[in-house]
Amino acid sequence: MEAIASTPTNRSLFSEKIPRTVLNDVLKCLKFDSINDTRVFTLKDLQPSLFEPALVLIEPYYIPCKARNYLHGQLTPNRILTIIRQILREEGYVLVSKEKTSNGIKAMHYQITACNTEATVVEFK
């Protein structure tokens, strides 16, 4: 008997796998080129007005009770970050975060990275 490898899907959030094209369209709403865009960003870069069209794209893939929790209500940069983490995890990607200090002000910087089974080290520039 032949074993078939499959990507683990978080069935506690999604009713079905989000297609890569939809995922790329969601990221384009936030001005990323694609899932492979390695640009570094902060919470200030996540504008709710830009992300609202993406909610319509991903809502059909969420389980209805989870869609109410994550997609409805006031959209904040932190909520956008949570949604991005959830959908990236489905494709085997993660958001790597690093705290940086600039002019005495601390800020978290994030970057989309492919998830490996081994520890991933990302060098921020």
Image (cartoon, rainbow, N blue to C red):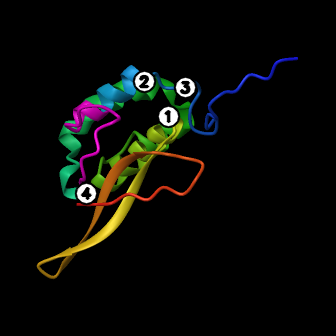
Q: Is residue 71 magenta?
A: no
Task: Locate residue 106 relative to residue 23 in the image: left or right.
Answer: left
Dot 1 or dot 4: first in sequence order is 4
Task: Locate residue 60 relative to residue 53 in the image: left or right.
Answer: right
Residue situated furthest left in the rendering: 103
Q: Amino acid at mark 4?
A: Leu
Q: Name the residue carrying label 3.
A: 17
Task: Locate residue 38 relative to residue 7 in the image: left or right.
Answer: left
Q: Quadrant of the N terminus?
A: top right
Q: Name the residue carrying label 2.
A: 20
Q: Name the residue carrying label 4.
A: 43
Image point (15%, 82%), residue name:
104
Image point (40%, 39%), residue name:
71
Residue situated furthest top in the rendering: 1
Q: Name the residue carrying label 1.
A: 91
Count neighbours of disc 4 (C-alpha within 10 A) and say few if under 14, some if 14 to 19, many if 20 or more. Answer: some
Image point (23%, 32%), residue name:
33
Residue 25 in percent (x, y) is at 30, 26
Count neighbours of disc 3 (C-alpha within 10 A) and say few if under 14, some if 14 to 19, many if 20 or more. Answer: some
Q: Amino acid at mark 1?
A: Glu
Mark 3 to mark 1: distance in Å?
A: 9 Å
Dot 3 or dot 1: first in sequence order is 3
Query: What residue range appears in magenta?
Result: 27-41
> Of discs 2 and 3, which sits in the foreground?
2
SS of the residue under disc 1: loop
16, 34: nearer the viewer: 34
Which quadrant would residue 48 be assigned to in this image? Answer: top left
Contact flag, marks 2 and 1 (Cβ < 8 Å): yes
> Of discs 4 and 2, which sits in the foreground?
2
